[in-house]
Image (cartoon, rainbow, N blue to C red):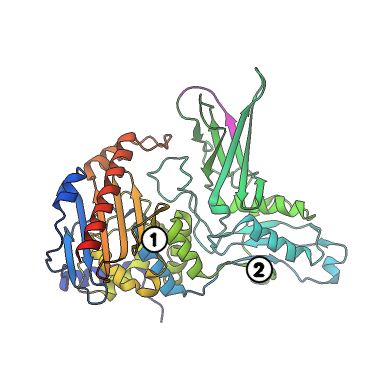
Amino acid sequence: MRLPTFSILLLLACVTAVSACASPSAATGPDDRAAIARSGFSPDDVGYVLFDPGSGAVLAERQPAKPFAPASVAKLPAMAAALAVLGPEHRFETTLHVTGRLGTGRLGDGVLDGDLILKGGGDPSLSSEGLTELLRDFGALGVTRVTGRFLYDTSALPEMPEIDAGQPWTAGYNTGVGALSLNFNRFRFDWARSAAGQPVRVSAWSVSDTGRVPLDSVTVQLGAGAGAAFTPLVAADGQPANGEPEGERWRFAPQPGMAASLWLPVTRPGLATAHVFRRLAAEAGIALPTPVPGAAPPTATLAALHRSEPLEVLARQVLRYSNNLSAELIGLTAARRLDPAVRTLPESAAVLTAPAMLAAPRTDWTGLRLLNHSGLSTASRITPAQTMALIRGAGPAVLALLPGEDEGKALPPGVRAKSGTLAYAKALAGTLTTASGRTLGFAFFVTDEPQRAAMDRTMDRRIAEIPAEARAWLARARKLQADLLEVWIAGL
């Protein structure tokens, strides 16, 4: 029987929440007032719940029913749901297909008289090395030239130019999303001034662990003037040229003192991946035509296959390194397993969250709003009590994947958690071991809603730097987080 669509799941969850909701019982825990005051926050800015993950008993809480911005803490329920839906051994596949039959008549002279199709399966870890592996296996068939088309197939997932429209254009963490994503959908832009009076030299590269490849899908229009160094350009009619997508188009105006190299997001991942594949094919002695979008027909023959590491390995990496693209691709794949009609990230997040909501009918799910799987949104909201329910639902196997660090810095011994950070929003959720040896779950949030709202109202998408006052706020939030962890570990 086909599972309900995301709208039905949400309706059922809302009915359940209204008819049988119960917030965690009031609990008295270690006194938190001194720590909150010492960090310069109002008690209204802070919410948390400290609980026994087995029984669900709440040991301490503050504003457990208030919605907060989860930031990257949203990746924890997303990975838990994906592991439940797809299974820890699930592997993402990237494939090469050819039209017609592979045989002497086709390949005897090294020429494939047919189409070659590169098909993506949403692999969040696909790198240039994976494409090289595909080419090695394809080249073993004796092909040196393709006379038909070179197609790239992104039909497995919807393709989007960015994760969140409220981020700076140049943010390397706000990339395009699609079934054919490569090298985390970032490219490195290099520039240098020649001799006086000579043009500025620019280049764009797709970079992996073993090297870099020129990215032919990027074009840069040089400009001048003060202000922003980079501005994305859009065609006047918004339509592809000659039936092909345009790729990355930027206006670049060098600014005094700016770095000679920086990372930029790929917004057309399928096209970019296909261009890198074509470059790598040329290096391998295989001539391919210019890539165009298309779908692998059912009659196409599988010519080569690349598989990712198991999902359990990828989920552990997402929880540690917090890569936004990886979280979105894994979440989208799992959500479309439940409902193939999913086309947007908010739909996908709703589908993937609804089963967990239905599994915890005593939790009040009012106010839950997750707009994607990565947490890269200032509009997403979750309460500490809802986070507690999702942590309990994740189970020990998923919680064991959590790192013992926050943004690369070690957490106190015995703390394993997923962190989340946005300007004026900080969160941490996971488990800790107390001085007496108890294992407890916790969900901590601190947010300055007015400051964040003011920042969003005045955002200039050309500017990527976080304001100095927001950096200072985050330093205080990290101090409060550390102080509360110390109190909880010592006092319970």
Q: Residues within 10 Å of mark 1 (few under 14, many from 20)?
A: many
Report the side of 430 relative to 315 (left or right). left
Badge 1 amino acid: Gly
First to last magenta residue range: 220-226
Q: What residue lies at 40% left-to-right and 58% top-to-bottom?
A: 345
Residue at disc 2, secondary structure: strand
Identity of the residue furthest to the bottom in this view: 1
Looking at the picture, how far across and down is residue 50, in whole percent? 22, 65
On residue 324, which mark appears?
Answer: none
On residue 404, which mark appears?
Answer: 1
Q: What residue lies at 42% left-to-right and 40% top-to-bottom?
A: 168
Badge 2 amino acid: Leu
Residue at disc 1, secondary structure: loop
Looking at the picture, how far across and down is residue 107, in whole percent? 83, 66
**Is disc 2 in contact with disc 1, using a CB cutoff of under 8 Å?**
no
Position of residue 457 relative to residue 255, above or below, is below
- Residue ID for mark 2: 305
